[in-house]
Image (tube, rainbow, N blue to C red):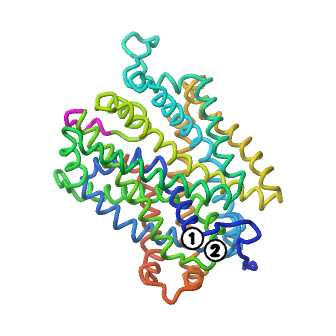
Amino acid sequence: MEKEKTASSRGGFGSKIGFVLAAAGSAVGLGNIWRFPYLAAKYGGGVFLLVYLIFAITFGFALMLTEIAIGRRTGKSVIGAYKAVDKRFSPLGILAAAIPALILPYYCVIGGWVLKYMAVFITGGGKEASVASYATSDPDTNLSFFEHFIGLLGEPTAFFVIYVLLTALVVFFGVEKGIEKVSKFLMPVLLVLIIGIAVYTLTLDGAGEGLKYYLLPDLTGFTVSKFLRTIAAACGQLFYSMSLAMGIMITYGSYMRKEDSLESSVRQIEVFDTLVAFLAGMIIVPAVFAFSGGDKDALNAGPGLMFITLPKVFAAMPAGQIIGTAFFILVSLAALTSSISLMETVVAVVMEKFGLSRAKSCITVIIMTLILGMLSVLGFSVWSEFKLFGMQILDLFDFTTNNIMMPVLAFLTCILIGYAVKTKYVEEEVMLGEKKFRSKLLYNVMIKFICPVCMIMILITPFVTKI
């Protein structure tokens, strides 16, 4: 192993709360808001919530603790970190660097869509976003406001570029003065907004039935097969939601102070992330349920839920323009904290690998992000007919990183820590300044046996059944 060093020479978080809020900000992203509620509604409400919670305090805890411990112990970016742990596993560093480099561009494209909708609602155009219809060459087919917007070239490009520059501005100022300071401001604002909107949503007529549908376990039609799919869905959602296997937690861990408790920090990040996902469900499921007349099929996942279904819900509810504006501000903050962590991970690699300053590294990553991101923008406009494996360019990037690269990286990381260098490698880092590693037995069982199995399940699920 290479000589370990602290993060002091690379900058770092100035406080434990700064680290926790930044890491939680990374974990709280679009997946919490547009996928978690849909999966909870689809897989038995309270059944899914219970399974998700169990995985959060076991599976999620073990993987996040591992990544943060690797980062803090080595004090390096992902490329250097894996090499420092065990030279035989050096290729994992390249994989861990490639994942955020591929996710960042298309994530920023989606972030640009969110900025567009925030601007539309702030300027009073929420009604238009819900009812606008655009004719096509097919007289029987009209485009929604969202479909028309992403089919353009100029506007999506402009909002994409603005979003990239906003993200880069925070990363440019470094860890303590940029990421930590912004996270300390944005995360409390995000929490206040999501609690406020959730409370208001529950006062709407018909929301009570939606809340029951969301919270109460529904075993109707549950079979062994559906229960296994529920486990796979909860496991997969947690994996993506907590920013695992993206190199982010290793990077942020490398900036963490040695005197701060690893175990309690991970628990706090888990609580924040799970709370936001739960509250997002309390906003979306009751609201959609109330304004669709109890139609369960109205709850869909992804862009369709956020950019087509929800604007219609806001248009129909009292004070919908105000609530819609607050909601898209909330989503913008959630997306921004995630894209900041993605960009920081890539910038850290460029700085370490090529010896560039932070400013030059930021410029390099901006250029790379704009070039790759434009592929996704063009994929919905002038290249909309072009598909690979039946997927548009953005969907292909998303599928490759989320369903193949990330599970493979996480699985091999479990093998590295569980069997190559042994769990003692992480345990020693956890014990710095601690009297006891409270979850030591749980951690060992999860990282050696349960997590690898979960990774294989996540890896094969998309090829076996559609979740």
> Picture quarter containing residue 368?
top right
Q: Position of residue 371 (x, y in %)?
A: 70, 37
Residue sitting at x 24%, y 33%: 292
Q: Is residue 463 visible?
A: no
> Is 241 or 389 nearer to us in this picture?
241
Q: Which residues are magenta?
A: 292-299
Residue sitting at x 29%, y 43%: 201
Report how far apart the C-alphas of labels 1 and 2 lie in the structure.
Answer: 8 Å
Residue 212 relative to residue 272: left or right: left
Main SS of the magenta part reads loop
Residue sitting at x 62%, y 42%: 105
> Is 335 or 91 nearer to us in this picture?
335
Q: Residues within 10 Å of mark 1 (few under 14, many from 20)?
A: some
Q: Amino acid at mark 1?
A: Lys
Q: Position of residue 167 (x, y in %)?
A: 64, 46
Residue sitting at x 71%, y 59%: 348
Q: Position of residue 381 (x, y in %)?
A: 57, 24
| 296 in magenta | yes
For label 1, the SS is helix
Quadrant of the image for the N terminus?
bottom right
Residue 176 relative to residue 135: left or right: right
Residue 37 relative to residue 216: left or right: right
Check the image and report above or below for 229 versus 147: below
For label 2, the SS is loop
Residue placed under numbered mark 2 in the picture: 257
Of the residues under marks 1 and 2, which one precedes in the sequence? 1
| 298 in magenta | yes
Residue placed under numbered mark 1 in the picture: 16
Q: Amino acid at mark 2?
A: Arg
Residue at the extreme bottom of the image, as rendered:
435
